[in-house]
Amino acid sequence: MSQKPVLHRDDPDAAPLTGNIKVTREDWLKQAMEVLIRDGVERVKVLTLAEGMEVSRSSFYWYFKSRKDLLAALLQQWEETNTAIIVAQAEAPAETITGAVLNVFRCTTNSDMFDTALDFAVRDWARRSDDVRRRLEASDKRRVAALAAMFARYGFAEAEAGIRAKVLYFQQIGYDLAGLDEGDEFRLTQVGGYLQVFTGAAPQPAELADFEDYCRRYWAM
């Protein structure tokens, strides 16, 4: 009779699991995130996730107390990725305000930094949950505040900085939601115009060239 394999657990100090438990906490979260984005929060169920990974649902309870615990982890991950990256990019150093806005453009251009589909899924979830709606509202305020502070660093008065931050933020969120049939190359040709509208300043040619190079490197990955 063959010996059962010793399988992975997140906590290295815990007793090892044996048998057919094949997934980690990160696997459960990844599967749940994919289902949330594809099918909505109603389909994020323990049995559905277990069937998708072809494992026993009992392994779920090594990592999460309940489905509610899993959903809370998904929201935390969303805040630690999408919200945190916008704040970080707004705070990134730049010589000009147009360069600072291009830093923000980088995260919404790169889905590895900012997952637009995940943001839409959480917004859809918020329509069904008051708690999630409050989390979303707090996240939006945090993002807008970071962008307003970015504009303020470059000499914009408080009121104007706040308005420009909202215009920039909600255009970035709404652009993908609108599902416009515009290719990447066309969008690149529009960057300078958007910068002029968002900031009132013309971007430096070197800034545009650097951003275009960044986009092309990402597209080639």
Image (cartoon, helix red, strand yellow):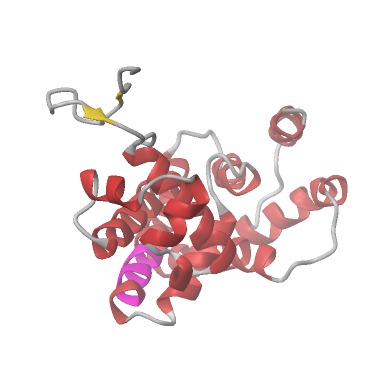
Q: Is residue 24 above or below residue 86?
A: above
Left/right of residue 34 with respect to residue 142 in the rendered view: right
Quadrant in the picture for residue 13: top left
Q: What residue is at 30 percent from the left and 18 percent from the top?
A: 3
Q: Is residue 7 above or below residue 89?
A: above
Residue 151 seen: no
Magenta segment, which residues?
133-141
Q: What residue is at 46 percent from the left and 62 percent from the top?
A: 161
x and y percentages locating residue 20 in the rendered image: 36, 35
State which quarter of the image contains the C terminus: top right
x and y percentages locating residue 214 in the rendered image: 69, 30
- Return the residue nearer the eye: 27 or 196: 27
Left/right of residue 165 with respect to residue 1 in the rendered view: right
Left/right of residue 91 with respect to residue 178 in the rendered view: left
- Return the residue nearer the eye: 162 or 104: 104
Q: Residue furthest front?
A: 1
Q: Main secondary structure of the magenta part?
A: helix
Is 136 magenta? The answer is yes
Left/right of residue 137 with respect to residue 64 in the rendered view: right
Q: Is residue 189 above or below residue 21?
A: below
Quadrant in the picture for residue 204: top right
Q: What residue is at 87 percent from the left and 51 percent from the top?
A: 186
Residue 47 seen: yes
x and y percentages locating residue 203 in the rendered image: 70, 43
x and y percentages locating residue 17 in the rendered image: 23, 30
Is 75 magenta? The answer is no
Q: What residue is at 51 percent from the left and 69 percent from the top?
A: 40
- Return the residue nearer the eye: 215 or 10: 10
State which quarter of the image contains the N terminus: top left
